[in-house]
Amino acid sequence: MPKIYADPFDVEGKAFIVAGAGGGLASAIVPALAERGAKLMLFDIDAERLAAAAIAAPGAETMLADITDEAAMTAVAKAAQAAFGRVDGGVNAAGLLPIARALEMDMEIFRRCQEVNVTGALLFSRALAAVMKPGGGRIVHIASVSSYVANPGYAAYAPSKGALLQLIRVLAREWAADGITVNGIGPALTETPLTADYLADPEFRKNAIGVIPMGRLGEPEDIVATTLLLLAPGGAFVTGQVICVDGGRTLV
């Protein structure tokens, strides 16, 4: 008989680490996990944003940490393990979105984008895998439609998200036998503080909406159900995938 899950989105009692917990996309993910009874370790590089995230998840543990710092990632993972007695997975919502034409782009910004979006994703994943073995667990990265599509001005961001796509696939292959699934979610351009300055330009906003067949930008709440699925029993046999929640953006 196949397994029948009473609730394929059940995360009650599971312990998760959320990277970039003070960011815009995490603003929907963190309270959704907390409301469903998950135990949370939240970290961010920004103390003010982290404090705001903690308000949305009463009882959550918090740490200031930089996802590009290997020692910090190890410390976060061990702190979560000590606090909860286990780590069942994590969500990486940390990221940078610099938009600039290739000939005008500051190369330090390019390097920092790769460091956060790719190197940080690897360090976060490794730290989780080290504390989850041998019981297995779930890792979810926020990727992007830019893992697949090319836009002018995305010479830093799109390569970082393309690399993240392949990192997800490689880690999924390497860790499948350990019971660890590694997946990503690819939102379309979403209304968050990270995109607010760009979207304040009427022409930029018009063009961004114009390539989304459903005719609107994403909202942080759009990715909650997919995140829950990938962390919960319903996602048990899904690994190495980037699931686009994009209003059809990748169809254009």
Image (cartoon, rainbow, N blue to C red):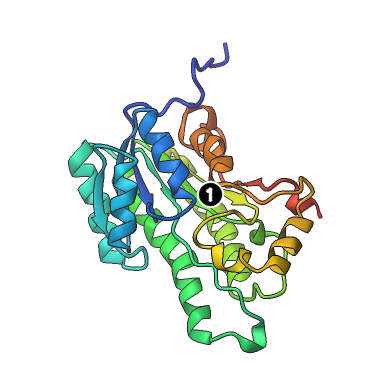
User: In which quadrant is the C terminus drawn?
Assistant: bottom right
Number of numbered labels in the structure image: 1
The residue sitting at 59% across, 57% down in the picture is: 165
In the displayed structure, 238 sits above or below 234; it is: below
Instruction: State the image coordinates of residue 103 (x, y, percent, origin top left).
Output: 66, 88
Indicate the position of residue 130 as horizontal and vertical percent values: 31, 50
Q: Is residue 31 visible?
A: yes
Horizontally, residue 88 falls left or right of residue 97, namely left
* Residue ID for mark 1: 173
Residue 53 falls left or right of residue 138:
left
Residue shown at 74%/61% (left/top)? 206
* Residue at the image point whose x is 79% and y is 51% from the top: 251
Left or right: where 84 falls relative to 220: left
Q: Amino acid at mark 1?
A: Arg
Farthest residue, direction bottom:
103
The N terminus lies in quadrant: top right
219 or 187, which is in the foreground?
A: 219
Q: Give percent across and percent down for residue 248.
A: 75, 47
In terms of secondary structure, where does tag 1 sit? Answer: helix
Let me know if residue 129 appears in the view.
no
What residue do we see at 53% from left, 16% from top? 3
- Residue 38 percent coordinates (x, y): 34, 32
95 to the left or right of 14? right
Considering every residue shown, the one lying at the far top of the view is: 1
Q: Nearer the viewer, residue 118 or 240?
A: 118
For the residue pair 102 and 194, the one nearer the viewer reads as: 194
Residue 222 against residue 249 in the figure, above or below:
above
Crowding at label 1, few (<14), some or many (≥20) Cα neighbours within 10 Å? some
Q: Is residue 222 above or below residue 105?
A: above
Q: Is residue 32 above or below residue 129?
A: above
